[in-house]
């Protein structure tokens, strides 16, 4: 139940964004040095995110309620977890915008303090509850509290970097809405795609499978150090790069470095899964084969995330709006025909294949973007 609530909170935040973060990084990379101009951009983005959040919660909360009900949640617990989902999404609307401001201004020390402090707070709360009493609702509440703390400090540190009283900008609004409309179909589909494994396991009534796949996926927390460094330091530098001749080399370096970092993790999960499963406890010691598939899918997702972030930072969205959904759907239909999704192992294979397919789309978008950048020079 906690896995479902946590996953749907992430989905709610993604739906509330709908390309706003993409446009914020793209436009902000050009105006971040002008405090008034940057303040207008932030206020415009915040206004749009609040409106999108209403639609997001109207979709994610009912879906979460249905999944929780199908997996045995009582009425009281169902409403409590849905409330936690909404309470956790609301602060993320602002903190994600303010975090982009800190990234573009290279405020790495403050971002480190924020991440470390928030992590320590969550550890302290979870540890205290574990000694007394803990369940899915209390664990979800800890997540919501952490999101609010993150919002408060991100806002406090980001406001001096921009004029909070700056009026919204009509041109920024138009550009953000244009990018939002361009990414809308894929964003919605991506949110569904991110939950497809949980949906399949819910439909076949495999509650234990949900717990297992999410538990193994927690090993992906090991990637957090890399993904945080990339999102905080490397991606903003790529967005600010004005030397068009450096872009291909920089892109290849960032993507190639990601593959080099994650490849040994997949090899370790395939050849020696026991140490990784030991982190989860004795109940998961028998999931050696499943561990390799889940870790491989997590690593591929990280690589796709890097490519997508780099493309978005330059607004390189050409093939993706057209080809992403058809490619995934065709792949999934073929997998449904060829795999027995009633089997837990087959569901994991399905997940890995669906995760791998979009890499060629991101690669083609990057090639087109680099060529157009040189022509427009």
Image (tube, grey):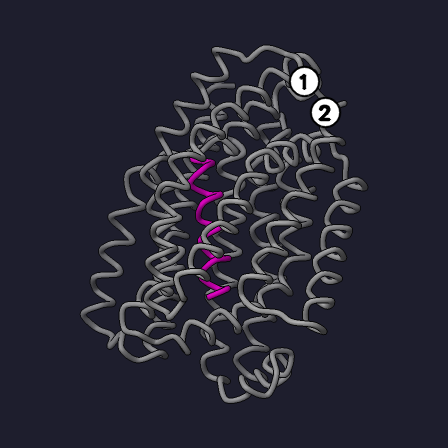
Farthest-out residue, left: 337
Question: What span is in magenta?
Answer: 1-18
- Give the residue number, with chain letter if any, for mark 1: 164
Circles 2 and 1, Cβ within 8 Å, touching? The answer is yes
Asked whether 344 or 267 is in front, the reply is: 344
Residue at image position (60%, 23%) is 42
Give above or below for 64 relative to 37. below
**Does dot 2 land on a helix, a strand or a loop?**
helix
Residue at image position (62%, 69%) is 134
Left or right: 43, with 357 as reference point: right
Give above or below for 324 relative to 75. above
Asked whether 64 or 368 is in front, the reply is: 64
Query: Residue 170: x and y, percent?
Result: 48, 11
The tag earlier along the polypeptide, 2 or 1, is 2
**Does dot 1 land on a helix, a strand or a loop?**
loop
> Badge 2: few (under 14), some or many (20 or more) residues near its Cα, within 10 Å?
some
Farthest-out residue, front: 76
Left or right: 163, with 281 as reference point: right
Query: Residue 334: x and y, percent?
Result: 21, 64
Give above or below for 363 relative to 236. below
Residue at image position (52%, 31%) is 314
27 within the magenta span: no
- Give the residue number, with chain letter if any, for mark 2: 159
Is most of the magenta stretch helix, strand or loop?
helix
């Amino acid at each position: 139940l906690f896995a479902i609530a946590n996953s749907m909170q992430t989905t709610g935040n993604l739906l509330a964004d709908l390309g706003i973060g993409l446009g914020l990084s793209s436009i902000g990379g050009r105006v971040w040095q002008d405090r008034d101009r940057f303040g207008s951009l932030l206020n415009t983005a915040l206004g749009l995110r609040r409106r999108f959040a209403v639609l997001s919660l109207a979709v994610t909360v009912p879906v979460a309620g249905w999944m929780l009900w199908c997996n045995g949640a009582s009425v009281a617990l169902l409403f409590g977890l849905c409330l936690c989902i909404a309470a956790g999404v609301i602060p993320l609307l602002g903190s994600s915008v303010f975090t982009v401001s800190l990234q573009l201004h290279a405020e790495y020390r403050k971002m480190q303090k924020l991440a470390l402090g928030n992590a320590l707070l969550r550890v302290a709360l979870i540890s205290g509850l574990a000694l007394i009493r803990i369940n899915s609702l209390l664990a979800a509440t800890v997540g919501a509290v952490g999101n609010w703390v993150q919002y408060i400090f991100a806002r406090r540190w980001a406001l001096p970097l921009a004029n909070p009283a700056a009026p919204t900008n009509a041109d920024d609004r138009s550009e953000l809405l244009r990018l939002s409309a361009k990414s809308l179909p894929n964003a919605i589909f991506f949110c569904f795609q991110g939950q497809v494994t949980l949906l399949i396991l819910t439909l076949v009534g495999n509650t234990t499978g949900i717990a297992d796949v999410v538990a193994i996926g927690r090993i992906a927390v090991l990637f957090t150090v890399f993904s945080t460094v990339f999102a905080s330091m490397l991606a903003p530098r790529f967005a600010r790069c004005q030397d068009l001749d450096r872009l291909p080399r920089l892109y290849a370096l960032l993507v190639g470095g990601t593959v080099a970092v994650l490849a040994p993790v997949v090899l370790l999960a395939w050849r020696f899964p026991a140490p990784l499963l030991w982190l989860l406890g004795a109940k998961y010691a028998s999931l050696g084969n499943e561990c390799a598939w889940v870790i491989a899918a997590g690593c591929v997702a990280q690589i796709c995330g890097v490519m997508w972030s780099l493309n978005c930072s330059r607004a390189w969205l050409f093939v993706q709006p057209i080809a992403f959904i058809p490619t995934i759907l065709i792949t999934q239909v073929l997998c449904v025909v060829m795999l027995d999704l009633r089997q837990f192992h087959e569901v994991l294979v399905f997940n890995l294949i669906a995760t791998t397919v979009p890499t060629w789309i991101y690669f083609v978008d990057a090639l087109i973007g680099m060529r157009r950048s040189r022509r427009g020079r």
